[in-house]
């Protein structure tokens, strides 16, 4: 080991316990508590204020602790995450979508700050459990919101759709992965709190999270429960093993009692009776868990039964489950039974995601080293897709990151995860404290639940989820007795991180202000306050000069005003603003359609043709592409006929009539690329496209 590297004893007490509970711990607990409740921080409207809050908290904490040498100590995981963050920042400069790239860079600054705050603030197990309690309470409330929506008692958009619980995440698979992760934290907390109110709270939490986990209908999350449960059991001590067995059996038994009557209530008009079944489930689960735990304690079985017998039985349990599957499925509600029965690699969902991954590799091949910048999949996938699906996420976190920051970025993430596992294994091995061993095991399983599920879904795209993951990792490193750290470069690193925090705060404030300006502008325009509305829309383009939709909206508004007032100077300015929009958003379908029409109406026909060419290039398998292309060609052809340019008009009209041949060729390519299922979409002639073709034929015939 070089002189720059060493194992650094953590600055906390050797016992890893403390009676000191500074205000900062509760602030951190809140920062990890609130994100799920705001649509998982998926949308900029909710995310930007959260980034402002996190950035300001980090800056305030850093200023308060500026003389604390512990604050300036950075380990290899810190540096790994700093490099990952900087890669997202660097790729902004050559990204395919500046706006999305900046958004992703800001997210990774957020994750870095959360990780550092968690690592620095949580330096003993008591502080860690304060934060864990906050996360578990948040989990209970998230499931309550989903349950309330299912029973028509809570009005939260898309919290319960098609029999699947999405809750505040508005996406059932992410909700399922979240419930699974927090469920293991509840099991951990229950093992720690053998008596007292938190023992009951954690027991209630375990049932509610297990209930939400099942009602999420997330097959990917379901599959992870057995292996993760087995691994958790093997990592914790006897006390935690007994608590886990008791809670899990109590959860399963209680759910078995209420699942049929509860799902029947969902099909009735008056659904409030479902609350009774939930309360019965809680009482049954808590009672059964307590009874089983008391029984296990009284039996005083040989520890070999817990350490060898039960694990061996658990390994053969799937065989028993398969043998009894027909009986189990007959008991379960039809929707749940069908979902379980359809778990296989041959489902249409699996087939579709395999296509996503194949198309992702096509993008990676063209952007191998440093990637496309943030938002690369969303921006480019339509150019590479095997058929005309619509998915703004690659449904694989690691592959999407590979697209965005290239092979270098994937290598850095891999290094971070290896360092994390290295720290986990070493600290788990050297500690003699069984509670700390359990904490390491529980946090690892919770993190593994999300990162494992992220191989098949886009959980990490909802910012609340990576905030939780990096927060848990940070806390785990914070309580570790030995951390691989670097002796030199602490001061410059501290200044660098502070700079990133300032960037996060400032840019988020500007972008949030821009968002409010554009909304105010639209509102004022609709109420007749034209000049005020125009000014606000112009302000939005200045506050966030990388968002193409702001420029296009501003261009459309001032163009309409200019045409009415016959103001040539303002018309030229509107065209200039649309040029800026298209320089930033040349891959955006709606912007390309809008710009093509805009340029045509303002006599910029050549630019209109450029937009249509880009539309066809960037969205070749979208049927609406050809609807807009044919409409544009017909409109220009009519202008040419009026101007006496018959030959140019006929050429365009013949292209319109021949669009069917182009579509047939594209569909042949689709058939050669993928296995045909009900999910495969072909390029079709829409009614409007057919109308344009018929009109083209009429124009040729009459001219």
Image (spheres, grey):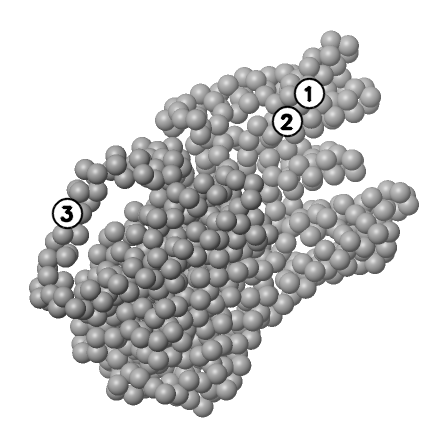
Residue beneath the point at 34% across and 58% down? 285
Left or right of 186? Residue 2 is: left
Residue 55 or residue 312, whichever sits in front: 312
Q: Quick one: SS at disc 2?
A: helix
Q: Quadrant of the N terminus?
A: bottom left
Residue to which mark 3 is pinned: 316
Residue beneath the point at 60% across and 30% down? 625
From the top left corner, tell me how far across and down residue 200 is, in percent: 36, 68
Query: Residue 343's quadrant in the figure?
Result: top left
Residue beneath the point at 63% across and 54% down? 547
Q: Quick one: SS at disc 3?
A: helix
Q: Earlier in the sequence, mark 2 or mark 3?
A: 3
Left or right of 131? Residue 145 is: right
Q: Which residue is at the far right?
A: 565
Disc 1 and disc 2 in contact, CB within 8 angstroms? yes
Q: Earlier in the sequence, mark 1 or mark 2?
A: 2
Say few, some or many: other residues with alpha carbon within 10 Å of mark 1 (under 14 / 14 to 19 / 20 or more).
many
């Amino acid at each position: 080991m070089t002189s720059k590297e060493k194992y650094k004893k953590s600055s906390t007490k050797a016992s890893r316990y403390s009676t000191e509970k500074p205000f900062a711990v509760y602030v951190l607990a809140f920062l990890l508590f609130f994100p799920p409740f705001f649509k998982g921080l998926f949308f900029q409207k909710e995310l930007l204020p959260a980034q402002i809050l996190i950035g300001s908290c980090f800056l305030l904490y850093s200023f308060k602790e500026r003389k604390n040498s512990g604050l300036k100590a950075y380990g290899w995981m810190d540096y790994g995450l700093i490099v990952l963050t900087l890669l997202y920042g660097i790729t902004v400069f050559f990204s395919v979508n500046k706006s999305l790239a900046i958004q992703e860079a800001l997210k990774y600054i957020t994750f870095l700050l959360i990780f550092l705050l968690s690592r620095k603030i949580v330096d003993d197990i008591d502080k860690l459990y304060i934060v864990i309690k906050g996360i578990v309470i948040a989990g209970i409330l998230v499931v309550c919101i989903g349950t309330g929506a299912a029973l028509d008692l809570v009005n939260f958009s898309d919290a319960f759709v098609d029999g699947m619980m999405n809750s505040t995440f508005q996406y059932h698979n992410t909700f399922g992965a979240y419930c699974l992760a927090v469920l293991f934290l509840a099991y951990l907390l229950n093992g720690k709190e053998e008596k007292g109110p938190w023992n009951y709270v954690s027991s209630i939490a375990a049932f509610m999270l297990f209930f939400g986990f099942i009602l999420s209908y997330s097959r990917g999350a379901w599959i992870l429960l057995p292996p993760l449960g087995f691994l958790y059991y093997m990592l914790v001590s006897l006390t935690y093993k007994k608590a886990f067995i008791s809670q899990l059996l109590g959860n399963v038994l209680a759910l078995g009692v209420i699942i049929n009557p509860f799902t029947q209530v969902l099909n009735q008009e008056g659904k409030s009776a479902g609350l009774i079944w939930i309360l019965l489930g809680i009482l049954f689960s808590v009672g059964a868990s307590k009874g089983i735990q008391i029984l296990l304690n009284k039996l005083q079985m040989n520890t070999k039964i817990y350490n060898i017998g039960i694990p061996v039985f658990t390994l053969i349990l799937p065989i028993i489950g398969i043998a009894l599957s027909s009986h189990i499925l007959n008991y379960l509600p039809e929707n749940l039974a069908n979902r379980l029965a359809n778990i296989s690699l041959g489902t249409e969902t699996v087939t579709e995601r395999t296509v996503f991954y194949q198309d992702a590799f096509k993008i990676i091949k063209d952007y191998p080293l440093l990637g496309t910048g943030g938002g690369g999949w969303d921006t480019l996938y339509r150019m590479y897709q095997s058929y005309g699906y619509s998915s703004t996420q690659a449904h694989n976190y690691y592959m999407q990151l590979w697209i965005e920051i290239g092979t270098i970025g994937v290598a850095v993430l891999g290094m971070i995860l290896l360092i994390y596992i290295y720290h986990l294994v070493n600290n788990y091995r050297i500690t003699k404290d069984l509670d700390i061993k359990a904490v390491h095991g529980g946090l690892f399983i919770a993190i593994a639940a999300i990162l494992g599920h992220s191989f098949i879904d886009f959980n990490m795209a909802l910012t609340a989820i990576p905030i939780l993951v990096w927060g848990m990792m940070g806390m785990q490193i914070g309580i570790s007795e030995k951390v691989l750290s670097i002796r030199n470069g602490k001061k410059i690193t501290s200044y660098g991180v502070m700079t990133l925090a300032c960037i996060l705060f400032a840019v988020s404030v500007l972008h949030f202000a821009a968002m409010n300006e554009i909304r105010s502008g639209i509102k004022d325009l609709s109420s007749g306050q034209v000049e005020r509305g125009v000014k606000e829309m112009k302000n939005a383009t200045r506050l966030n000069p990388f968002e193409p939709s702001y420029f296009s909206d501003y261009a459309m508004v001032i163009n309409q005003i200019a045409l009415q007032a016959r103001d040539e100077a303002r018309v030229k300015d509107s065209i200039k603003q649309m040029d800026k929009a298209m320089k930033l958003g040349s891959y955006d379908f709606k912007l390309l359609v809008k710009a093509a029409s805009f340029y045509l109406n303002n006599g910029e026909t050549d630019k209109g043709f450029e937009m249509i060419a880009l539309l066809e290039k960037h969205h070749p398998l979208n049927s609406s592409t050809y609807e807009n292309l044919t409409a544009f060609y017909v409109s220009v052809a009519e202008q040419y006929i009026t101007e006496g340019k018959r030959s140019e008009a006929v050429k365009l009209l013949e292209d319109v009539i021949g669009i069917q041949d182009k579509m047939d060729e594209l569909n042949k390519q689709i058939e050669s690329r993928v296995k045909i299922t009900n999910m495969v979409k072909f390029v079709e002639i829409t009614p409007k496209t057919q109308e344009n073709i018929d009109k083209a034929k009429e124009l040729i015939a009459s001219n």
